[in-house]
Amino acid sequence: MNLPELGAFLRTRRDRVRPAELGLPQGPRRRVPGLRREEVAHLAGLSVDYYTELERGSTKSNARPSAQTLAALARALDLTGDERDHLFHLAEQPVPRPAHRAPAHARPALLGLLDRLSDTPARVITDLHVTLAENDLAKALLGASPGHHGPTAGFVYRWFTDPRARGIHPPEDHSRHSRVFVSDLQAVAARRGRDTEVTRTVAVLRRRSPEFAALWDDHDVAVRRADRKRIVHPVLGLVELDCHALLSEDGRQRLLWFTAPPDGPGAGQLALLSALAAGRRDVPEGAALRDPAEDGAGATG
């Protein structure tokens, strides 16, 4: 454990916090612009002597700060997420995982990029492939997304539970897509840790799909960042496009967009797709087979 660096970091963070920001009186006798050591100790529920030893980087005590102590210090010093993680790293403690909740809205940065992609199909999805936002070209190419939310609304869930969802791709491509979906989900499960939403989704899919269960037991892992897809469109026929993915910093959301390969007819097909989108001729995507008994187990909101 790097005690001197840990102490220096705590000291600089203490000096940065203004007492008024925490509702503490300035007082005419305050000599420092930031917090006093005893104030940090009080806010974190620690003894002044113990906090002083930490800040000095003292080696008198071999006791490493616990995760609870570090979390209390992070709150007392009003650390940012990056600063809190740095504090845990300096103390050689595992960085706590954030509580995962299904995002209801696309990240502003990804939405800003989506708004700029007016001439190519694009959508923002979660790491469980639930669509959060999409442009008209994506609707015209892939069909309107289902109206419900939760893991059962994700395309990866429908892929293994609803045969109609697979109609968007040629049958000879189905096994490859299945492997890609499961490999990607393995990475999601590892990144999220013991997250209820993912563990329930995996449990339901293992129970409902022997194909999924067999692929899951292979333990192949690969985050999907780019792929070439063949899409069966009711008007354009077989459309071959490159699919690109930009992941958010935490991997929870992705911006997907489609471009035409230089060696195929995709550019002309995308031009025709723009005409379809302008005419509002959305193609319904395969709806999920709703199983009330399973929906409750899979959807965590």
Image (cartoon, grey):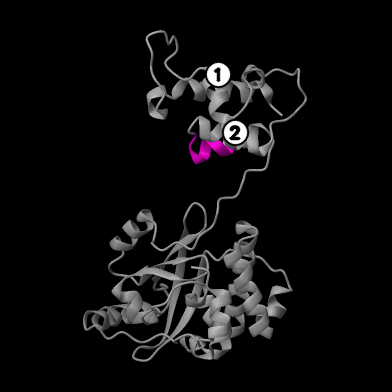
Residue 80, magenta (yes or no): yes
Place of residue 273 in the rendered image (x, y in percent of width and height, measured from the top left): 30, 81
Main SS class of the magenta portion in the image: helix
Residue 293, magenta (yes or no): no
Task: Work out whether 107 lies above or below 80.
Answer: below
Q: In this rendering, does residue 228 appear at all? A: yes
- Tell me the CA gap for discs 2 and 1: 19 Å
Place of residue 79 in the rendered image (x, y in percent of width and height, measured from the top left): 50, 34
**Tag on residue 38?**
1
Q: Which residue is mark 2?
A: 87
Q: Are marks 2 and 1 in contact (CB under 8 Å)?
A: no
Q: Nearer the viewer, residue 289 or 143?
A: 289
Q: Quadrant of residue 133?
A: bottom left
The first of marks 2 and 1 along the sequence is 1
Q: Quadrant of residue 87?
A: top right
User: Which residue is located at x 47 percent, y 20 percent?
Assistant: 35
Where does the N terminus fall, quadrant-wise? top right
Could you tell whether 79 is left or right of 90 in the image?
A: left
Q: Nearer the viewer, residue 229 or 280?
A: 280
Q: Amino acid at mark 2?
A: Leu
Q: Give the structural element (helix, strand or loop) at label 2.
A: helix
